[in-house]
Amino acid sequence: MVTPDGIERDITLTSAAARYDELWVRDAVGEPPLRREEVLELLALGEVIARKAVYGRQLAVRSARRAGASWTQIGGAMGVSKQAAWEAHGKWIDDQAEQNRRSDYQGLDGDQVAAARRLAGDADG
């Protein structure tokens, strides 16, 4: 059975989106109808795309901070308040640390977490 965890490491965001789009169009048209395995793949691909998009967004946030962008500017670019952008990034850092604790190879290790927190600063920075 296809699962997000089973395919996430082996597929790029571009490849996942292309396959998702292919299945989505077939599902919308209904001809030929998707088999159960394909519908489950569609669901798994949707989750993979969401995960990769969130990860990519947070990498862009880190790049924006490195380039000197304020949280007000980052929040504006994301369509949210500076506080919401800062909090979302802090939660992402926490999630990456937890992922590393669970898997010992994914996510951010202790040094990377500390560096990410220093770069993030506070919401007013």
Image (cartoon, rainbow, N blue to C red):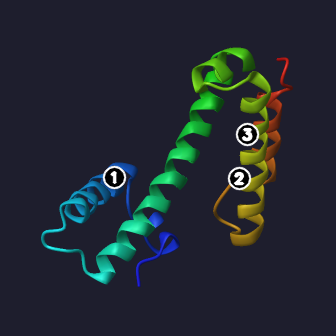
What's the amino acid at mark 3? Ala
Nearer-N-terminus badge (1/3)? 1
Work out whether 118 lies above or below 20. Answer: above
Label whose residue precedes the other's in the sequence (1 or 2): 1
Query: Which type of secondary structure does the marked residue at label 3 adopt?
Result: helix
Q: Which mark is residue 108?
A: 2
Camera-side mark, 3 or 2: 3
* Image quadrant in which you'd find residue 103: bottom right
SS category of the residue bearing label 2: loop
Query: With respect to residue 67, does 38 lie above or below?
Result: below
**Rendered residue at 57%/32% (across/down):** 60
Residues at circles 1 and 3 in contact by the CB criterion of under 8 Å: no
Q: Quick check: 93 left or right of 124?
A: left
Judging by the rendered image, the residue that carries numbered circle 3 is 88
- Marks 1/3: CA distance? 24 Å
Q: Residues within 10 Å of mark 2 (few under 14, many from 20)?
A: many
Q: Is residue 13 left or right of residue 100?
A: left
Which image quadrant: the N terminus?
A: bottom left
Q: Residues within 10 Å of mark 1 (few under 14, many from 20)?
A: some
58 sits to left or right of 89: left
Tell me the kind of residue under disc 1: Ala
Is the residue 60 above or below the residue 11 in the image? Answer: above
Question: Decide: marks 1, 2 in contact (CB < 8 A)?
Answer: no
Instruction: Give how far across and how far down residue 16 sits, in percent.
Output: 35, 57
At x 83%, y 24%, the residue is 123
Mark identifier at residue 34: none
Quadrant for residue 114, please give it: top right
Instruction: Find disc 1 in the rendering and name its residue.
Output: 17
Q: Position of residue 44 (x, y in %)?
A: 44, 68
